[in-house]
Structure formats: C-alpha cells, structure tokens
Image (cartoon, grey):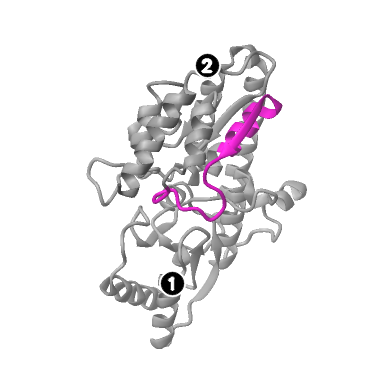
Amino acid sequence: MGIERRIGFIAAMVVGLLCLAGTAQAGERLAVVATTGMIADAVREVGGDRVEVRALMGPGVDPHSYRQTRSDIVAMTRADLVLWHGLYLEAQMEDFLEKLSRRQAVVAVAEGLPREVLLAHEEYDDRLDPHVWMDPALWSEVVLAVRDALLEVRPADAETFRENAARFLDELDELDAYAQTVTATVPTDSRVLLTAHDAFGYFGRAFDFEVVGIQGISTQSEAGLGRIRALVDMLVERDVPAVFVESSVSERNIRALMEGTAARGHEVALGGELYSDAMGASDSWEGRYLGMIDHNVTTITRALGGEAPAGGLREWRVAE
C-alpha cells in the first residue's frame, strides 16, 4: 500500500473512532488545532486562557509540502475546533481537512477574504497567493475570522473573545504603522526585495517594494539555471545591495545568486534571514506574529539602506 493510501486509511479509521467524542463543556478550555504557527498565534491572542492550542507546523516547516501525520490526525479529530489557512497553502492536506469538515468544526480562516484584495497565483490560473499574513492589515481580517470561529463553538465566552480580539487588532494597527514608517525610508533605487520564493507579494504591495522570488509562490516549483542567470543580470544591472534567505526554504539558490554576482564584480550582501511560511522559535519574539513581521520589516529596511531601530517595533514603541 502506497504512503498516500496508508495515510488515507489511517485518517478514515481514526476519524471513525474519534469523531463521536463530545466537545468541551462550558468552563473547560477549548481544544483548538491550527495548521500554521501564524493561525495558532491568532487563536492564543483571541482565546487567551479559554483555549488550548496545538500548531501542526512548527518553526522552519514548509506548509506547501506538509502532510498530516498519524498524531496530527488524532489531534484534529479530538479537537473542538480545527483552523486551517486555505487558499491552497496546505495543498497536501486539503482533501483530509475537507472530509473532516463534514463531521466537526473545521474552518479555513483565509478563504473568506474578498477576492478583490487577493493576488493572483502566477503558476495556476484558478489559484490565489495564500501569503496574506505578510500584510498586517489583511491579517487583521483573518484574526476576525478566528474570533468568529471561536464564538461559534463557545458563545459563552463571547465577551472575552471580543475584548481580546480588539486588543490584538490594536497591536496589529501599531505594527502596520511601524512598518509603513520605517520602510518609507528605504531609497527608491533600493526597493527590490529578492528572496528564495515568492512569498512576499502582499508585503511588497503594502509597503511599496518590488518583490522577486527565485522560486514561485509554492516552494514545490524549481528554479532553473536560466532563472538564476537572469536574476544575476538583474542584481548587477540594478546594483541591488542585498538579498535574503528564508527560515523555511533552502538557501542554496540564494547562495548561487551571490556567487554569480560576485563573479561579475558586484558584491551583493546577505541581508539576513526572513520568516516567510513559518514563525520563529516558540519561546522567542519572532515566535509571535507581531515579532515575525517586526523582524522582517526591520531586517529588510536596514539591509536595503533605510532607517529602523535595531530593536525594531519594541524600541520604536518606547521612542514614540
């Protein structure tokens, strides 16, 4: 039996055994499973001490290629609520999640975003760019979807969920204001953001950067030698000062670019590591959504010649 058939068999068996379990009673903490760290963070912020959250994908994990494990299946079928991103981000998990949604509370929190605010997927005509967390204003809408999902399964805690969501939305507004302020200081000629894959489209639109990814929107696409040569030409001709690696994507292609530009007499710097499809370690500032985006904004701004405090948002907050 192939691996996909084995996983499907296990999923069907576990769902059949566990889906009859009752949901949490009033006063108990809601058991919530989130596919990505970004969604799990939103649940913690909105749910507070009324929720117990498990993120399936931890630091450095690529959601485009992730497949549910047996322990994931058990956790999801026992949960009071399962939250996933949608927009084809969890491509390898979609079939399971859609089947699970027929039996229990399962919500794709980014699917409700208006289509007019979403970017097209360059590789698939019928798909959209899923990386909406790169824009704090768009992520605020996803936070509201998380709040509403929690309200649906636990209306008794509505006041807590609404108050926590309002506080977190204020913090997202502050993050967006910081990002708008510091990124505006990057010189016009340097506003080129080149990373391992095309995860920063919404970031570029929100903060006025030209975004270039070596790979496409999905990390499953491959970058050929022709693509590398073309990007080396662009970096040299436009005198781009820095390029960036990503925490969840191999840096092999970025290193090839740097070697190629060096051979042409142009030294391009490694601007730093960015968080694209996964957040940082759970016990770090970058392990929160606020810290993830703060890190990216601050790192990009400083590497491309702009002015941002070394301590990022938290230092800016004190100075303000």
Left or right of 4 on screen, residue 149: right
Q: Residues within 10 Å of mark 1 (few under 14, many from 20)?
A: few
Q: Secondary structure at mark 2?
A: helix
Residue 31 placement: quadrant: top right
In the current view of this chain or complex, which residue is farthest to the right? 318
Q: Amino acid at mark 1?
A: Arg
Say if the magenta span includes residue 291.
no
Q: Is residue 48 magenta?
A: yes
Disc 2 residue crowd, few under 14, some 14–19, many 20+, Cα 10 Å: few
x and y percentages locating residue 36 in the rendered image: 51, 42
Q: Which mark is residue 60?
A: none
Residue 87, x across and y down, in percent: 36, 38
Determine the residue positioned at 24% across, 47% down: 124
Q: Position of residue 128 (x, y in %)?
A: 32, 42
User: What is the three-letter code of the residue carrying label 2?
Assistant: Glu
Question: Does any portion of residue 117 appear in the rendered image?
Answer: no
Secondary structure beneath dot 1 equals: helix
* Residue drawn at the location 31% of the way across and 67% of the way down: 223
Relative side of 144 to 281, left or right? left
**Left or right: where 35 falls relative to 167:** left
Residue corresponding to mark 1: 252
The part of the image, by quadrant, that contains residue 38 is top right
> Magenta part of the protein: which range?
40-66
On the image, the x and y values in percent for residue 260 come to: 39, 81
Look at the picture and state if 217 lies above or below 273: above
Q: Earlier in the sequence, mark 2 or mark 1?
A: 2
Q: Report which residue position mark 2 lands on.
A: 152
Q: Is residue 143 above or below residue 188?
A: above
Left or right of residue 4, residue 34 in this image:
right
